[in-house]
Image (cartoon, rainbow, N blue to C red):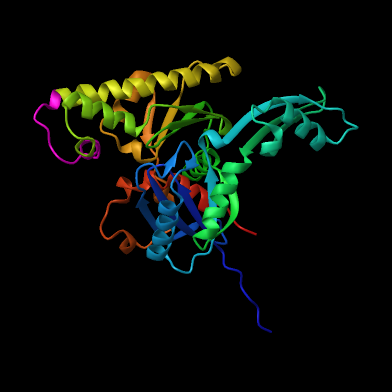
Amino acid sequence: MNFIRKDNATVGLDIGSHSVKLVKLRHGRSGGHFLEAMGKWDLKPGTVENGEIKNKDALREALTTLVQQCDPSIVDVVISMSGNAMLSEKFTFNVDPHDNPEETILWEASQRSPFDVDDITLDYKILHEFPEKNQIEVLLIAAKNQIMQGYIDLVYEAGLRPVIVDVETFAIYNCYALENEAETDNEGVVALLNVGHNHTNITFVKDGLYHSTRDIATAGSFFAKTISRQLNIPDDNAAELLRGRGDVADKELLSRALEFSAEELSTGIDLAFSYFRSTEKSDKIDRMVLSGGGAYLAGLTKVLAERHNTNVRISNPLAHIEYDPGLFRGVDTRTVSAFTTIAVGLAMRKVD
């Protein structure tokens, strides 16, 4: 008898506002992962803004080119939604034990969502049940249909098939869980900061479990614009300085510009944490993990560690995945791993 073995690999496709990242992982039977392909393609400015596709042709071309360079056989992909197109929040509902909990959850969700219920897709996960109080704690997800369908249609137009639409912050959390599988002490508050080009999202993890997510306006582009303005140099030169390339005569002025930008991001973190603190009995962030291209911004980890009196590290999911070193052609994976955090988290999803 001939048996057809199902392909046990998943492709994560992270479509950001500045670039597109692709990661293909093969899943081992014992639970490990092997990196088969990875790539990054920068987008033209204005292609994607605040989670909305503004230049379909440019994005379609970028997806097609990236797939051809990484693995032309790729068809099925896992994509994610973020920004203004998504809303995730935890709620506690009173439920009648004789009623259908799904009907109660969806009805309550329709009442609480800031979006028009006719224009969104709702999903949920029951996190905790409290039978003695007839209550349940639920994580609600709402996605704007028009924006989500726009991504799905464009991915199809690029010759790909989106088999799962995930949430960006959950992909980041999956990577955090991957990096902490061996940890036995997960108590405390962890802030997962994905510092992108146009915005930063911060995901709070309490005692190892997902808690909530908030968006911060300060991100990589703010750093670049601040340096460009303070040093009176073009934006491209400022971006190179942020990557640790190039040189500048007034290093002290550059240092002050970087510190000012980091302080702005830190203020946004404080505001997000104030909401978290209002719902949980926690006075401080015990650890921070940075991901996204902004994780490599010069001096950012040092400023955040001092400002928030906590341990700050850069996400490195590739350290927990097997791969052929030749795939990176001598590049130190620690200098690119944080870029891949969302794509790796998406690729960790096993497709049935």
Q: Quadrant of residue 227?
A: top left
Residue 222 sits in which quadrant?
Answer: top left
Q: Is residue 244 magenta?
A: yes
Q: Establish if 143 lies above or below 309.
A: below
**Residue 118 image offset from top left, x and y in percent:** 71, 36
| Residue 27 to residue 201: above or below | below
Q: Is residue 247 left or right of residue 172?
A: left
Q: Which quadrant would the N terminus be assigned to in this image? A: bottom right
Q: Residue at x 64, y 36 (%)?
A: 141
Residue 196: image quadrant is top left
The outermost residue toward the right is: 98
Residue pictured at 46% horizontal, 51% vertical: 56
Q: Residue at x 35, y 24 (%)?
A: 304
**Quadrant, the C terminus:** bottom right
Nearer to us in this view, 255 or 182: 255
Residue lying at the far left of the rendered structure:
249
Q: Which residues are magenta?
A: 239-252
- Where 288 sits versus 1, above or below? above
- Could one spot residue 256 in this view of the protein? yes
- Residue 10 visible? The answer is no
